[in-house]
Image (cartoon, helix red, strand yellow):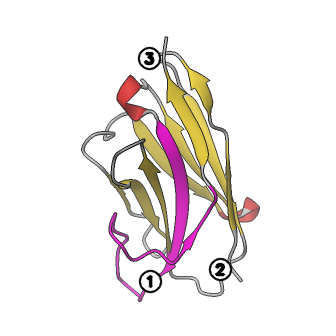
């Protein structure tokens, strides 16, 4: 059964950086997507970024595009989210999620993910 575990959250000042990690079980297919979502208190869950294994394509929410970078280290079964120039509005619990994909199908920031981690808190404050 697929399992995911996030780490790397913490308290950082505005303008600072954090790198989140998501260690996951081995995928049973070569075609999958890994995504990062976040949820702030009182707000709906928001898709942040995703990665497609087939073509290594990525996608980002407009709110983080140019500041966040998703990457995957297959040898370590780990996905990363590098977050730069953090803003107070980035404060949230961040979750990684996984989904199997059909060949040629790209990841989305929608509701296709069926396995989730427990989340890691990111707080951006001075």
User: Which residue is disc 3 drawn over?
Assistant: 15
Q: Can residue 87 be spotted in the picture?
A: no
Tell me where the magenta segment starts and ends, as one range. 92-118
Q: Residue 99, how many percent across, how many down? A: 50, 77
Q: In this view, does 45 lie above or below 12?
A: below
- Mark 3 or 1, which is nearer the eye? 3
Q: Is residue 2 left or right of residue 95?
A: right
Q: Determine whether label 3 and label 1 are within 8 Å by CB.
A: no
Q: Determine whether label 2 and label 1 are within 8 Å by CB.
A: no
The kind of secondary structure element at disc 1 is loop
User: Which residue is disc 2 drawn over?
Assistant: 27
Crowdedness near tag 2: few (<14), some (14–19) or many (≥20) residues, C-alpha within 10 Å: some
Q: Is residue 58 left or right of residue 32?
A: left
- Residue found 53% across the figure and 29% down from its top: 123
Quarter of the picture holding the N terminus: bottom right
Give the mark nearest the N terminus, 2 or 3.
Answer: 3
Of 90 and 62, nearer the camera is 90
- Residue found 72% across the figure and 72% down from its top: 25
User: Which residue is disc 1 drawn over?
Assistant: 101
């Amino acid at each position: 059964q697929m399992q995911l575990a996030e780490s790397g959250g913490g308290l950082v000042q505005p303008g600072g950086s954090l790198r989140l990690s998501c260690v996951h079980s081995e995928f049973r297919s070569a075609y999958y997507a890994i995504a990062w979502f976040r949820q702030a208190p009182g707000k709906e869950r928001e898709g942040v970024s995703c990665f497609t294994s087939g073509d290594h394509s990525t996608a980002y929410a407009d709110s983080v595009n140019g500041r966040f970078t998703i990457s995957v280290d297959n040898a370590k079964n780990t996905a990363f989210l590098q977050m730069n120039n953090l803003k107070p509005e980035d404060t949230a619990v961040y979750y990684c999620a996984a989904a199997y994909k059909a060949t040629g199908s790209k990841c989305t920031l929608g509701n296709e993910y069926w396995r989730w981690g427990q989340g890691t808190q990111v707080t951006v404050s001075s």
